[in-house]
């Protein structure tokens, strides 16, 4: 009965979405305030329906209702309860329902936090979001119904994919989806601005906090995914340039460009069309990501469910949403010319360089991700594009971004002199190169050019951020603190990436109990291999003692788990001794006979900084979104701010 | 307005490629062995290990060679199709390669699910599998009278694949002189 209730709620949500997509938008066009006033209550009702539908599915999982096909395929009576809940979004149908729910949550948030906005604008925003919602709800109901029943309910479910039975994976998908779907708000704001023929830049100010918060979620989601891959896949890697990772990274890059471009548009009335294009782009890439993951056009470790009919549906949906908005752009953009003017040496230019480069980076990743598909579609054979391509294009393109970043923070809006900027930054530039070189010799045993370059770039960002913070300590805004924190986060991540990828050490070894091996100044001793029962798996556990200078510093346990369901799919649980300056990582490989096992040992300096940096970036986003310039007042009219006091504030 | 249409045009190209991509099965990896001779092997038979089965034994016959194992769950899905095919008069000669299996398990399995194979080769360590480029069980090969591999099917054979691809090919190969 409960699953049917969920199904009914889902249909009701679809009806609400249709009402939302029609009346408020048409009402705004005809200036019918009665029709526009439908937007808020209908959006809230739709949210309620989605909560009911989602709760119904959660209930089916908790009570092990295997008469529901989706539950039977993705749960098991032995599955611990927290994983039964996360199993709700563990596969295709449920994760789409989560998508729809999160879209509902964002719409609900828009109804709460947009009281100060013009009525027709809110009506249009919610209407556009309603249109998106229709697409996803139809997709759910027509091709991927999570509430479908099986006639003969099995006694036992097939269990959740063991890869997903992990605390990190409980929160990773919702975080990522909050980010993905959050870009629909900025997208809807841009579409609403175009529909309304808005020539001023007030929409950009309204869109900024929404964009920043979505970006925070996406940042955390990507970082969590990377961290999970690191400790769960057992290879010590943290980024694989897998198509699905790219699918989340591309909207992140577009979103980062959008945040910067929105700031320029709002404050200086420049790059208006470019900003609108970026807003469309960020959300389109989120949809494209969904398409790539859900249609199975690209093979990947993430492609759980692939079904061509679903692919066709998403492709049509993608075509309608993105094609429609780009058509609208082509029609409306010529009328939305930017007023602001700026000279070549100005913060405006640096922001433009930044966002153009980020988009170029995004496009090269897009090309690399889709290249195998394009080649095969043209009948030229099958190939795969791997990490070497992405590293080769990504790193050189990011170097100018980071260099421009440091200069940009000291440059004035509109017009500046190179001599003034250089006077302020030259100390930082020299210091970062010198300290970068020195640190390389101090921190790591073998100095290589890549490390010096990476550390110097990180220090350049770090020093310029801190200096600009201290010179402004009297008039610090949340926005400025947020920007600095995010930039410092980037520096921290760069340090982590540079040192861990250039100076990690690893040893693969065949070992029996009592054997020892030396890695990076540490001695590892395999103490024993034992069998351990788990709730829904059987584990083989290796206990490894780690010594440094003959003193035991820690004892690590690494497991290999065989999950009962799913044909005994094996999973590794790496044993990790985390530290701020280094991780020690052990993973248990295959049994080699005669009591011997293959083991992999890794020494990974500074790897934790990669995710630490992401935390700083997220914190920066939260701070920036709290800036008081984003607080809406009923009477506030947007103005183009040019005065000198605010020119150096948030970017 | 032209330059404002550029993003739309780029997007249209992208959608076109994605649409074509949808029609392609990403799991399909073209086998380098298609239209090449069947790699030579000489393996003991499953039920009578004293006798061997060689790749050259197939000369003169149109053969469906199925790589299977008792531990392979999807083999159970395709197996009834082969049992049925073995009963028909115009079908191919069906042979099996029992892959990385235990002999007793495999024999029991055939007793239980039926034996469509004229004989199964026992590839205990999967070495012939490596020569054939097997990367997942089940896999099915169609071999013509002169010992050339004409078709490779990865994963369980479905009724659809049998009707649309495998049987027409077998008919064609049987009708031809080679």
Image (cartoon, coloured by chain):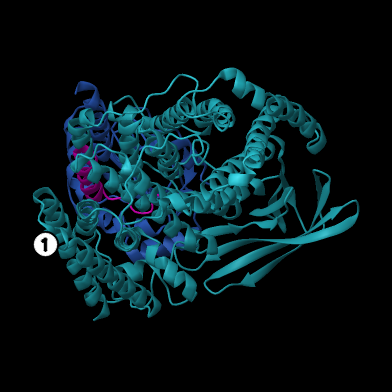
Residue A179 position (above or below residue A492): below
Residue A239 position (above or below residue A84): above
Chain A shade in the render:
cyan
How many numbered marks does the figure carry? 1
Q: Specify the farthest residue to the right.
A: A550
Magenta part of the protein: which range? A303-324
State whether residue A93 appears in this view.
yes
Q: Chain coloured blue: which letter?
A: B
Provide residue A41's location: percent of width, then percent of height: 21, 67
Residue at image position (12%, 55%) is: A22
Query: Viewed as shown, does residue A555 lie left or right of A184?
Result: right
How crowded is the residue under tag 1: few (<14 C-alpha within 10 Å), some, or many (20+)? Answer: few
Residue at image position (16%, 63%) is: A38
State whether residue A501 appears in this view.
no
Q: Nearer the viewer, residue B156 or B122?
A: B156
Provide residue A534's location: percent of width, then percent of height: 58, 72
Say which chain tag 1 marks.
Answer: A
Query: Viewed as shown, does residue B174 lie left or right of A218?
Result: left
The residue labelled by disc 1 is A34
């Amino acid at each position: 009965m409960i699953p049917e209730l969920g199904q009914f709620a889902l249909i009701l949500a679809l009806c609400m979405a249709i009402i939302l997509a029609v009346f408020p938008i048409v009402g705004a066009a005809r200036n019918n305030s009665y029709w526009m006033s439908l937007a808020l209550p209908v959006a809230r009702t739709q949210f309620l329906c989605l909560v009911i539908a989602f709760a119904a599915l959660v209930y089916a999982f908790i009570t092990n209702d295997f008469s529901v096909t989706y539950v039977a395929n993705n749960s098991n009576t032995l599955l611990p309860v927290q994983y039964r809940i996360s199993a709700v979004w563990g596969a295709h149908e449920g994760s789409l329902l989560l998508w729809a729910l999160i879209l509902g949550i964002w719409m609900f948030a828009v109804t709460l936090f947009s009281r100060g906005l013009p009525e027709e604008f809110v009506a249009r925003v919610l209407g556009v979001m309603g249109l998106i919602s229709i697409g996803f709800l139809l997709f759910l109901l027509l091709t991927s119904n999570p509430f479908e029943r099986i006639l003969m309910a099995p006694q036992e479910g097939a269990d959740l994919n063991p890869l997903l039975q992990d605390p990190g994976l409980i929160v990773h998908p919702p975080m990522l989806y909050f980010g993905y779907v959050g870009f629909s708000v900025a997208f809807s704001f841009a579409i609403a601005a175009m529909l309304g023929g808005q020539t001023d830049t007030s929409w950009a100010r309204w869109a900024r906090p929404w964009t920043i918060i979505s970006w925070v979620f996406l940042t955390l989601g990507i970082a969590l995914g990377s961290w999970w891959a690191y400790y769960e896949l057992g290879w010590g890697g943290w980024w694989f340039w897998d198509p699905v990772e790219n699918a989340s990274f591309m909207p992140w890059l577009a979103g980062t460009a959008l945040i910067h471009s929105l700031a320029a548009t709002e404050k200086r009335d420049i790059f208006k069309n470019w900003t609108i294009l970026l807003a469309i782009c960020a959300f389109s890439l989120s949809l494209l990501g969904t398409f790539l993951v859900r249609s199975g056009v690209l093979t990947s470790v993430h492609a759980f469910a692939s079904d061509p009919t679903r692919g066709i549906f998403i492709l049509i949906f993608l075509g309608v949403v993105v094609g429609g908005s780009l058509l609208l752009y082509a029609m409306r953009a010529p009328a939305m010319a930017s007023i602001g003017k700026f000279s070549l040496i100005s913060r405006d230019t640096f922001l433009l360089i930044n966002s153009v480069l980020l988009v170029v980076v995004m496009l090269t990743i897009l090309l690399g991700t889709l290249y195998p598909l394009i080649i095969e579609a043209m009948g030229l054979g099958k190939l795969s594009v791997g990490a070497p391509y992405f590293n080769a294009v990504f790193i050189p393109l990011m170097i100018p971004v980071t260099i421009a970043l440091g200069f940009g923070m000291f440059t004035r809006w509109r017009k500046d002199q190179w001599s003034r900027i250089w006077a302020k930054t030259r100390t930082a530039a020299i210091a970062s190169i010198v300290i970068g070189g020195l640190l390389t010799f101090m921190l790591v045993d073998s100095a290589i050019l890549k490390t010096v370059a990476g550390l110097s770039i990180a220090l350049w960002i770090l020093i310029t951020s801190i200096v600009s913070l201290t010179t402004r300590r009297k008039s610090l805004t949340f926005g400025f603190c947020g920007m600095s924190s995010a930039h410092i986060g980037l520096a921290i991540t760069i340090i982590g990436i540079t040192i861990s990828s250039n100076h990690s050490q690893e040893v693969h070894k065949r070992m029996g109990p009592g054997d020892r091996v030396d890695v990076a100044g540490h001695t590892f001793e395999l103490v024993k291999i034992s069998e351990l029962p788990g709730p829904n798996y059987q584990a083989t556990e290796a206990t490894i003692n780690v010594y440094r200078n003959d003193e035991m510093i820690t004892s690590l346990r690494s497991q290999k788990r065989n999950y009962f369901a799913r044909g005994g799919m094996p999973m590794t649980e790496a044993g990790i001794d985390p530290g701020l300056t280094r991780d020690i990582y052990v993973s248990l490989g295959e049994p080699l006979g005669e009591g011997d096992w293959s083991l992999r040992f890794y020494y990974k300096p500074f790897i934790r900084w990669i995710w630490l940096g992401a935390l700083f970036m997220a914190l920066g986003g939260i701070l920036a979104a709290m800036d008081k310039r984003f607080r809406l007042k009923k009477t506030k009219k947007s103005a183009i701010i040019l005065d000198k006091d605010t020119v150096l504030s948030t970017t | 307005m032209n330059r404002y249409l550029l993003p739309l045009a780029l997007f249209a190209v992208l959608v076109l490629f994605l649409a074509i991509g949808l029609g392609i099965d990403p799991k399909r990896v073209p086998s380098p062995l298609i239209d090449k001779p069947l790699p030579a092997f000489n393996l003991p038979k499953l039920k009578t290990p004293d006798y061997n089965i060689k790749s050259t034994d197939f000369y003169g016959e149109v053969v469906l060679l199925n790589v299977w194992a008792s531990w392979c769950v999807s083999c159970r899905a395709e197996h009834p199709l082969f049992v049925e095919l073995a009963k028909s008069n115009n079908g191919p000669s069906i042979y099996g390669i029992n892959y990385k299996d235990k002999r007793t398990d495999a024999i029991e399995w055939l007793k239980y699910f039926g034996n469509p194979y004229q004989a199964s080769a026992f590839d205990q360590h999967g070495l012939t599998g490596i020569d054939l480029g097997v990367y997942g069980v089940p896999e099915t090969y169609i071999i013509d009278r002169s010992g050339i591999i004409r078709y490779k099917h990865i994963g369980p054979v479905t009724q659809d694949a049998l009707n649309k691809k495998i049987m027409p090919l077998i008919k064609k190969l049987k009708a031809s002189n080679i």
